[in-house]
Amino acid sequence: MINADPAPHRRAGSDRPATAERLGITSPTPAPVNSWPGRKALVPSPGAILHPMATVVAFHAHPDDEVILTGGTLASAAAQGHRVVVVTATDGRMDNEPDDTRVNELRSSTSILGAHRVECLGYADSGYGPIFYPDPVGRTRFGRADVDEAAGRLAAVLRTENAQVLLSYQSNGGYGHRDHIQVHHVGKRAAELAGTPRVLEATMPREVLVRVARSVAR
């Protein structure tokens, strides 16, 4: 779910469904505009915050988060002609064993969603739970990454894409995962560095978290 608000930055807490309309994205019109092939012309609704042809960058912790947390929103935005870029902080690997499974899944899922560009910053997965494992040789776990360094890399994408919206995470990462919390900090800093006008934070529905907690407790 995406927590949208007219303010540039907003704490999460809404349980409303995520839709392209909540991003300020409007329905397509046949009027031609200057754009690359296949991109539709869009006209903003009154008070819309996004440009008629918006670029949305979704920043996620791991491959699969793009679907779990923002899949519907990204698919809707892409279907309406907006440029969608997905950036993941990690490749989903806890170690250095050669395994492209999750990156390949990321490529497949973003293709289905209609994303135009996919980037992976290459940090190692920090894992979830009480043990914060040492970094694998030659790589840094995202939970230990220097915020300014990681934010600078994300900001470079935001600037190149001239992004109007950055999708990030709420301050607790939804459920406390180290990498998800780091996405919040890095995303916020990257938007400041790049001057991205709007940041929206993905939230975890409270009802879902309660059901999961009750199931684990049984």
Image (cartoon, rainbow, N blue to C red):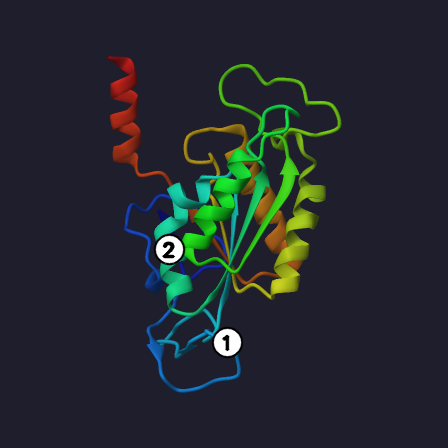
Q: Nearer the viewer, residue 137 or 23?
A: 137
| Amino acid type at mark 2 | Thr
Q: Secondary structure at mark 1?
A: loop
Residue at x 51%, y 35% (from the top left corner): 180
Residue at x 38%, y 65% (from the top left corner): 79
Name the residue at the bottom extreme.
31
- Whether 183 is drawn above or below 51: the answer is above
Q: Earlier in the sequence, mark 2 or mark 1?
A: 1
- Whether 91 is drawn above or below 151: the answer is above
In-image side of 131 versus 200 (left or right): right
In-image side of 15 versus 94 (left or right): left
Give the residue pinned by disc 2: 73
Q: Quadrant of residue 94?
A: top right
Q: Quadrant of residue 100?
A: top right
- Whether 160 is drawn above or below 95: the answer is below
Q: In the rendered view of the protein, which quadrant contains the C terminus?
A: top left
Q: Give the percent coordinates (x, y) of residue 201.
A: 45, 48
Residue at x 38%, y 57% (from the top left corner): 75
Residue 198 in view in this figure: yes
| Amino acid type at mark 1 | Pro
Name the residue at the right extreme.
138
In-image side of 39 versus 122 (left or right): left
Query: Of discs 2 and 1, which sits in the foreground?
Result: 1
Question: Which numbered circle lies on residue 37?
Answer: 1
Number of numbered discs present? 2
Residue 23 in view in this figure: no
Q: Nearer the viewer, residue 59 or 45?
A: 59
